[in-house]
Amino acid sequence: MALIALFERQSAELRETLTDLATFHRQVAEVVRQLEEAFAADKKVYVAGNGGSAAQAQHLAEEFTVRYRSERRAYPVCALTADGAALTCIGNDLGFERVFQRQIEALGQEGDVFIGLSTSGNSENILRAAQQARARGMTVVAITGPRGKLKDMADYAIVAATESTARMQEVHLHAIHLLCEAFEPGSEIE
C-alpha cells in the first residue's frame, strides 16, 4: 500500500500543477498560432533541450515531421539534439554552451522559430541559442518552468507551474502533444 500512496502523492502533484488550465491552454494556443504562421510562410522550426528535454525535443520534431495520430503533411521541425557529430564537434571545439547556438547560426533564418526546452530555464546552451535566434530575427518559444531566464527571453512561453522537475517534464510532454493535436486533420488549423 505504500507504493499506491506514493503514486497518489505524485498524481496529486500533477493535478495541482495543472489547476490553471486556462492560462496553460492560452500559452499553448499562442505558440500554435506562431507555428501556423511559420509553416504558412515556409519557415522552419528548430527545437533543443538537454537530457530529458533533449528527448522531448526529438519527440516533438518526429511527431511533426512524420505523424502524430493521422496521416497529414510533414512539417519542417528539426531537433538540434539529433546530430551527434555536430554536438560533439561543436562541444569539443567551441564549448558545450554553444552546441545549439552554432547550429542556429548556421541554419536559422528570419521568420523561423526556435523552441527551447529547459526545466530550470537557465541552461546556458539554450539561453545562447535563444539569443542567437533573436539576433537572426527568429521567434523564440520557451517550454520551461516558473523560474529562470528563458521565459523572459522568449517571445512566447509555455510554463509548467511547479518546482518539481518530473512534473515539469510531464506538463511539457502534454504541451507538446497539444501542439501536435492542433495540426491534426479536422482541427481548427487543418
Image (cartoon, rainbow, N blue to C red):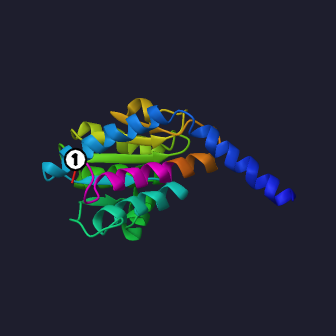
> What SS does tag 1 mark?
helix
Q: Give the residue at mark 1.
A: 36
* Residue at the farthest right position: 1
Let me know if residue 190 appears in the view.
Answer: yes
Q: Is residue 76 magenta?
A: no
* Residue at 42% over, 55% down: 177
Magenta highlight: main SS: helix
| 184 sits left or right of 178 in the view | left
Magenta residue span: 172-188
Asked whether 158 or 88 is in front, the reply is 158
State the image coordinates of residue 88 (x, y, percent, origin top left).
43, 65
State the image coordinates of residue 78 (x, y, percent, origin top left).
31, 60
* Residue at 49% over, 54% down: 173
Let me know if residue 112 appears in the view.
Answer: no
* Residue at 71% over, 49% down: 10
| 45 sits left or right of 157 in the view | left
Q: Quadrant of the C terminus?
A: bottom left
* Residue at 63% over, 45% down: 14
State the image coordinates of residue 44 (x, y, percent, origin top left).
22, 54
* Residue at the farthest left position: 41
Amino acid at circle 1: Glu
In this rendering, the answer to whether 30 lies above or below 84 is: above
Asked whether 156 or 11 is in front, the reply is 11
Asked whether 41 or 79 is in front, the reply is 41
Give the class, few, some or many, for how many residues have Cα within 10 Å of label 1's Cα (few <14, many ≥20): some
Q: Tell me the quarter of the picture where residue 22 sits.
A: top left
